[in-house]
Image: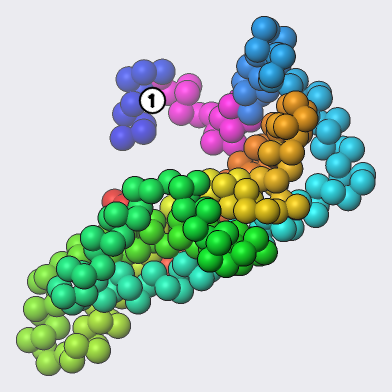
Amino acid sequence: MDKFLGNTLGGDGMNKISDKVWILISFVTAIVLWQLISMSEAGVVFASPVEVIEKCIKKIADGTLWLHISYSLFRVIAGFSLAFIASIPVAFLMGWYRPVRGLIEPWIQFVRNIPPLAYIPLIIVGVGVDERSKVTVIFIASFLVLVVTIYQGVRSVDATLIKAAKILGASDRDIFFKVVMPASTPFILVGTRLGLSAALTTLVAAELTGASKGLGMMIQTASGNYDMGTVLLGIIIIGIIGMAMEKFVRFLERRLTGWQETHVQ
């Protein structure tokens, strides 16, 4: 398909350019556009690449950047890990047992439409302003994405496979672990990607709950001081962390589901 589109739109010459070259071209284009925007009237609120690099060097030198990154990474990983552990049994129970689905699905559909900022006050009152509140906000956002995605995977398992396994005398346990689980693995991995993304996008909101360190807090403090260079630095670092996590999960997808064709994106 890619080859056909290349021949149609740009000829064989475009197809000879490697993905790494395209990434480099994309990066350079982004830097040029960024510089042009910073030189326009928007430059008042849009720091230039040089300013952001200077801020980065300064924060690396004084050690604060690594401190902010480590706190944020801990919160994201802790919140996501708890969500992953909790979502798998819930999603499989929802997909496997209709009464469980009927009971839990309305709750999930209701809560997933509420933005994290709305329930932050409840979390602060409930668990305080320590690390638990920040991890809880990230946990909720990740859990909702994970459980919905994995549940869809369980529901999409081919009924023919289950019937065939039953005819061959497989127990419910065997069907679950040898049919449903492998067939749902691509959805678990997609849910992992989406859950990590939700964790990162909720990070800034989570660090509204009384954080003194973290990338979200760094962005908020810099915004209050009209330090747009630091604001952009924090945004870029969160984006880089997200891309690194995405690459890692895609690597796991290739290793764990390379045998299985999947159209899940």
Asked whether the viewer can see residue 257, the reply is no
Task: Name the one closer to the observer, 85 or 214.
Answer: 214
x%, y% of residue 156?
A: 20, 62
x%, y% of residue 153?
A: 27, 63
Q: Is residue 105 above or below residue 165?
A: above
Q: Is residue 152 left or right of residue 217?
A: left
Element on which disc 1 rests: helix
Which residue extends farthest right?
A: 61
Tell me, what colour scheme is on the image? rainbow
x%, y% of residue 164?
A: 10, 80
Q: Is residue 241 above or below residue 77?
A: above
Q: Does 74 lie within the magenta span? A: no
Q: Does 25 lie within the magenta span? A: yes
Task: Name the one closer to the observer, 262 or 209.
Answer: 209
Task: Name the one closer to the observer, 235 or 205.
Answer: 205
Question: Within the image, what quadrant is residue 90 found in?
Answer: bottom left
Residue at left 65%, top 37%?
A: 235
x%, y% of residue 62?
A: 92, 46
Q: Is residue 49 left or right of residue 85?
A: right
Q: Is residue 216 left or right of residue 173?
A: right
Q: Is residue 150 left or right of residue 174?
A: right
Residue at left 58%, top 52%?
A: 206
Task: Name the one closer to the observer, 245 or 25.
Answer: 245
What residue is shown with label 1?
6
Asked whether the viewer can see residue 127, the reply is yes
Say which quadrant the N terminus sits in: top left
State which region is magenta. Answer: 11-26
Residue at left 89%, top 38%?
A: 58
Question: Within the image, what quadrant is residue 105 found in?
Answer: bottom left
| Callout 1 amino acid | Gly
Q: Main secondary structure of the magenta part?
A: helix
